[in-house]
Every structure is written in structure tokens, then in C-alpha cells.
Image (spheres, helix red, strand yellow):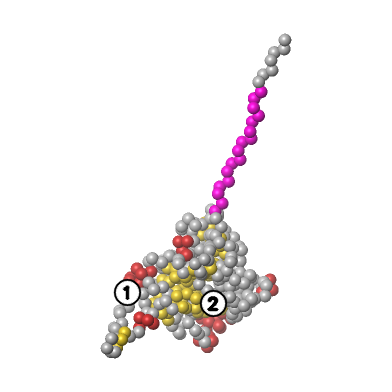
Amino acid sequence: MHFLPYQLPALIVMVASVANAHIIMETPIPYGVANLNSNPLLADGSDFPCKQRDNVYKLPEQKNLMPIGQNQTLSFIGQATHGGGSCQVSLTTDKEPTKDSTWKVIHSIEGGCPSPHPGNLGDDPTGHGTDKFQFAIPQQVPAGDYTLAWTWFNKIGNREMYMNCAPITVTASSQKHKRRVHRHGAAIVHKRQPEPSIHERADALSSLPNMFVANIGNGCSTAQSPSTLAIPQQNLGTSVDHHAPDELVPPVGSCGGGQAAPAVAAEPQAASPPLPASQAPAASPPIASAPASASAQRQVPAASPPAQAPAPPAQAPAQAPAPPAP
């Protein structure tokens, strides 16, 4: 998707008003841009999902149209990137999601999201410089209206979960709209198929993995800072971008699948302030995002075997008694 600057005036104004800015999703255009702030979800999860607030599901002026199988762009506004981290793109059939909504992952990014830059890119809340990522609606997703979520687990700073949501309309791929030509030259126009019901669309999404959720009072947390989340295998999916050569660290606590390390999650903390730009190296140009190759490997540290108790010290052999004196 491509958007001109004049198409996002409310988004620019809103971001400029945020004093303690991080980043927000620029494309797809999110719900409720007029009062969407860039802070993470609250540590108690009370604003999950989609940063609950007044007019949270107010539709943007322009639709986010996404043909099946066509590359889409995930981009951001802001420069407080906290050293990167891991992100996911997920869908739900609910147009106004609640805490009971089911989210299904269509793309995961491990490392370097929203930027592989060590530290922050700068301190401009309306600035750019983060990487742009490509994803596509899978072929198995039927046409219809959905809510898309971008979620981010930062590498540096407090253990937080960021989440922005956007309304999208999935359309049939362009190839499905082409007219077939009869062998005698007469064009045959096929009637458009009726849009699948919400239940049919939910069934089609059922084979996709559930969205990973942590750091919002659910007993699961990302590992101590600085660390890049290794998204649990059961939440990862098959469309994966390994965007930076970070060592990936599993989450801790009760994360619903046995992937978590046996450690206690940290107490919830206040939102991380952006790292001062002066404490980070100069920003480097964003790296073009590319899909993960078959040779890309997840650098997840293996669990250490339990330590064995030391062997007891060897005892000296017993000596025979001395013979009696004559």
C-alpha cells in the first residue's frame, strides 16, 4: 500500500502531541488515529486488545484494501525503537475486537523489528527511519473484513507489549478477477462468488497459530532486557522474517506451550521512556526487509542439562592390622 503525506494528517498531529513517544503503525492505517498514543499496553492488560480508549474503533478515512497473496507494507512513525525486538502481524474476524477475540498469526518477524539499530534512531516522534516490512494475506484467508494487529516486544527497556490495530478488507487476488477467454474468442465473465460468512472465515483461519501475548499480567513475560524474543514455536507460523542476527531468547513464565524458560516473570513496570538519542550510535540507513530464506536459522539457546551432584570422595583402602609383637 502507498499513502501520500496528506492522507495521514490526523495521524501526524496525534503523534506530535505525544510527549513520551515510542512508535506507532503508519501503514496499514490504524483505527482511531486521532487519539492513538504510542505507549505500550498497560502492564495489567486492561487496555488489551488494540489499546482500548474512547473511539478506539473509529474507522480511518481511507480503506486498507489487501488482495490475497499480494505484498503489503508494514511501516511506522517515530524513532524510539528500543534496539529492535520481535513483531507479529495477526488477524481476527471481529471488527471491534475484545479480550475474548481470537487472533491468528499471518507473519512473524524475529529480531530487528521495527529496526535493527542498536538503541533509538532519534527522538523525533513524527520522524521516520524504521525499516519497512513486507507481508501478504495467505491464500487460505477468504475475502472479507478483518481487524489486523501489529504487536511488538522490544529488545531494550521494560518488558512491554505494544499493539496497534487496523481495519482491513481482504479481496480476491487479481488473477481471480481476470476474465477467461473461450477458445473461439468469446470472453466468459464469471459471476462474483458471495462473500464467505464470518463463521466460514473463522474456520479458514483456524489452522493458523495463535498470536503470542506477554507482559500484560497474563503470567508470561519476555526475558530480562536486553533480549530479543524467540517467539514460541506454536505461535510462530510459517511466514517468518529473521531480520537481524540477534540471539533469540525464549519467554519466561507460563506461556501456554512449554517453550518458556523456568524462571519467574518480573514485576510489571511503568512504560519505558524513549532512550535519549545521544546515548545511541548514529542512525544507519534502514535495511531492506527480505523474506527469510530456507537456510535462516533461529538462534535459540538450548536448555542447559540439570547439574549433577559431585561424586563422593574416594576412600582409602583399609589396612591390614599389624602382627602382634613377639
Residue position marked by numbered label 2 in the rendering: 132
Where's residue 81, x and y in %? 59, 72
Where's residue 282, x and y in %? 67, 75
> Going from the N terminus, do you reach mark 2 or mark 1 first?
2
Q: What residue appears at the point 58 percent right and 66 percent down from the top-left corner? A: 245
Where's residue 92, x and y in %? 41, 71
Q: What residue appears at the point 49 percent right and 84 percent down from the top-left corner? A: 2
Amino acid type at mark 1 = Ser
Q: Magenta residues: mostly which secondary structure? A: loop
Closest to the observer, 187 or 47: 187
- Residue at the extreme right: 326
Secondary structure type for disc 2: loop
Q: What residue appears at the point 56 percent right and 68 percent down from the top-left corner? A: 111
Q: Residues within 10 Å of mark 2 (few under 14, many from 20)?
A: some
Which of the numbered marks, if any, corresponds to residue 197?
Answer: 1
Secondary structure type for disc 1: loop
Give the quadrant of the C terminus. Answer: top right
- Residue at the extreme top: 326
Residue span colored magenta: 303-319
Could you give the CA–CA distance between mark 2 and mark 1, rounded to whole angstroms? 33 Å
Closest to the observer, 175 or 104: 175
**179 left or right, relative to 23:** left
